[in-house]
Every structure is written in C-alpha cells, then in structure tokens.
Amino acid sequence: MTRIFSGVKPTGHLTLGNYIGAVRKWVEEDQHRADALFGIVDLHALTVEHDPARVRRLSRQAATLLLAAGLDPERCVLFVQSHVDEHARLSYLLECTATDGEMRRMIQYKEKAARERGGSVRLSLLTYPVLMAADILAYETDEVPVGDDQAQHVELTRDLAVRFNQRYGHTFTVPKATHPVVGARVMNLQDPTSKMGKSDDSGPGIVYLLDEPDVVRRKVMRAVTDSGQDVVFDREGRPGLANLLEVLAACTGAADPAELAGDYASYGALKRDVADAVVELLRPLRERHAELVADPAYVDGVLRAGAERARGMARPVVDRAYRAVGLLPAV
Ligand code: AQP
C-alpha cells in the first residue's frame, strides 16, 4: 500500500491556505487510499523566534483542528513530531549527507532569512529541510501531499535519499510530492503576490480556519484586487482576482477558475460569492473543533496512540540507516 507522510508546523493559527493546499486532500483522499501519517511538526517551529507557551498551545490546536477537519485516527496516524525521537536521530545522518550549498539554495530559507533583516538566523532555519527530509524518509514514504511552496524541499529529500542509498546501499524509499490540482498556492488577500502564510504579520490578508464568519466576510470583501472592471482569470496581470477565483474554485469543486470568471460582471459579486463559499467550507470544521476542545482527553489519547504507532514504524528504518553508515549498534 502507498505510504504517505505530511505535516503542519505550529507556527501560527492554521489558514485557509493550509486547508485548501494540503489538509483537505489529506482528509478527503489520502487517508482513504493510503497508509497515511500526519505530523504536527513542532521541532520546525523552533527555527525562528517563538514563545514556548504559544508553540505548545498551537500544537494542541493544530491537532484538534486536523481531527475537526476530518482526519480519522482509525484510518491514519496523527502524532506530534517531538514525541518520536527518530526524527532528530535521522536528521543528523542526513546533515552528514547534505551540503551547505544545497541548503543555502532553498527559497524558503532565503525568504525567511531575509525577514530577519540582518539579525542573526538560527542554524536550524538553514537545516530545516534536512529535518523535513528525516520526517519523510523515516517512514519509507512514497508520497508527500503538500502545497507547491514545499515542492523544493521534497525535491531535496529525494536527492538526499538517492545519495544516501548510493553511498551506503539501499536504505530509503525515494518519495515524490503530490499537489492539489486547484488551490496549490493560496495567496495573501492583501498581497496576492505572496502566499497566505500563517506566520505572516498581515492579519487582514489571511483567513484563519477559526475566524468567525463575519471576520471571514470582511477579509474577503476587503481583498486587494486591481482597478479593472471586467472579471477575467489572469494570474500574472491580475493576481488578486485570480486568487479569489482560485479560492472559489477550490471551495466549490469547480475544475477551472478561468471558466468561473465568465459568471461574474463585477468584483463585488465575485467577492460576495467567495466569502459565502469560504464561510460554508469552514462551518463544519469550526463546529467540530468546538466539540473537540471540550474533550481534551480524547485528543490526548489520539496523540499518545499516534506517537506509539509512528515510533514503531520509524525505529527500524532509522536503526537500519545507523548501521548502514557504520555506527556500532548498542548492545
Ligand atoms: N498559502 C498556501 N497555499 C497552499 N498550501 C499551503 N500550505 C501552506 N500555505 C499554503 C501547505 O500547508 C501545509 C502545511 O504548511 P506548514 O505548516 O508546513 O507551513 P508552510 O508551508 O511553511 O506554510 P505557512 O502556513 O506559510 O507557515 P509559515 O508561515 O510558518 O511558513 C504544507 O503542505 C504547505 O504546503
């Protein structure tokens, strides 16, 4: 059976981008057709300045939201990355496989390092893609369903797996990324040339999964478009409009955002429909989240069982890698 691994970082409240670009596919497709693991990848949240209590809170919230979105612990493994030591163990071996040049070429590193504006950048921000490779390779993963902002990191994971296998003999499965057809990159409503990222500061441009319906409507109605009149799909020339059409297509299941454009004579009508569609998309999730928050013992139980299963899967793979590179097994 196909093995799938993916995850979310508890660096902020989950957004519409996380849901449309990744989580929805995990819920609707991946957990049904494959042997799937989903991680709250909390070690990755330590690569930038953070408030420890907030990371803890966001980790629990992310787990609760993923369950609310429909991940079913009977069908998949949901766990917290730091509960499974194998990720950090394997990461070191992969640091011994990667080069610093490779790391410095990562687009996300360059973007995030630039945000530090000359301040010091944590070494872990540079090595983040290696830990991500360990997350994936520890589980003999075949497919990594992600938004297309993560495509370069999965490509690096493939390179590291191939290099390690060539040097030390076959150890890792070489995975591939999969992306949703529509909504692989949801853009910030206030700055449609950058992606809707949960750790950005621009609140009004980001729809959070737990935003109240009136907040969602306000954000969508105030989305930046351009001064044109006609509704056309042009990602390069009219990025704000294209983003709204893509979000509408993703919410309604329409295959082609360009075709949707023909249904609208004004920006206002389009924005109203986008707002309604997003509110409806998120309604069941918000309701289920409220129920789950009232039952923390259930969420704890899911995470405990998930970590145990994940450990059992990762340990033999990581032990094999330790032996392959020449480390003396403990007796
Ligand atoms: N805007 C987006 N459009 C489509 N997919 C997206 N994803 C994130 N943002 C968008 C996908 O969501 C999954 C989980 O993301 P992550 O937690 O690993 O973090 P990220 O990719 O770095 O996204 P964020 O939300 O922007 O976090 P920060 O701001 O902390 O960097 C991934 O599959 C991602 O592709």
Image (cartoon, rainbow, N blue to C red):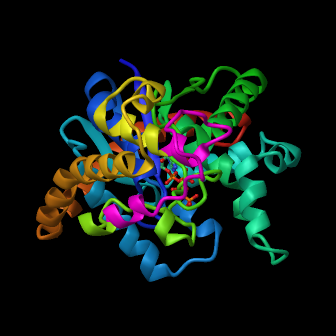
Which residues make up the magenta segment? 216-243
Residue 152: x percent and y percent? 68, 37
Q: Classify residue 287 as left or right of residue 253.
A: left
Relative to 12, is 329 above or below? above
Q: Classify residue 269 as left or right of residue 213.
A: right
Would you say the magenta stretch is mainly helix, strand or loop? loop
Residue drawn at (29%, 64%) of the image: 210
Relative to 271, is 250 above or below? above
Quadrant of res 265: top left
In the displayed image of the protein, which residue is found farthest to the right? 101
Asked whether 247 or 12 is in front, the reply is 247
Give the number of marks: 0
Asked whether 22 or 88 is in front, the reply is 22
Residue drawn at (79%, 48%) of the image: 103
Asked whether 51 or 161 is in front, the reply is 51
Residue 67: x percent and y percent? 23, 51
Residue drawn at (21%, 49%) of the image: 280
Does residue 324 appear in this view?
Answer: yes
Residue 14: x percent and y percent? 40, 59
Residue 104: x percent and y percent? 83, 50
In the displayed image of the protein, which residue is found farthest to the top? 1
Q: State which quarter of the image contains the N terminus.
A: top left
Inspect the magenta stretch and tell me whether residue 79 lies in it: no
Quadrant of res 262: top left
Relative to 47, is 134 above or below? above
Inspect the magenta stretch and tell me whether residue 242 lies in it: yes
Q: Classify residue 328 as left or right of residue 26.
A: right
Does residue 330 appear in this view?
Answer: no
Relative to 40, is 318 above or below? above
Residue drawn at (33%, 62%) of the image: 216
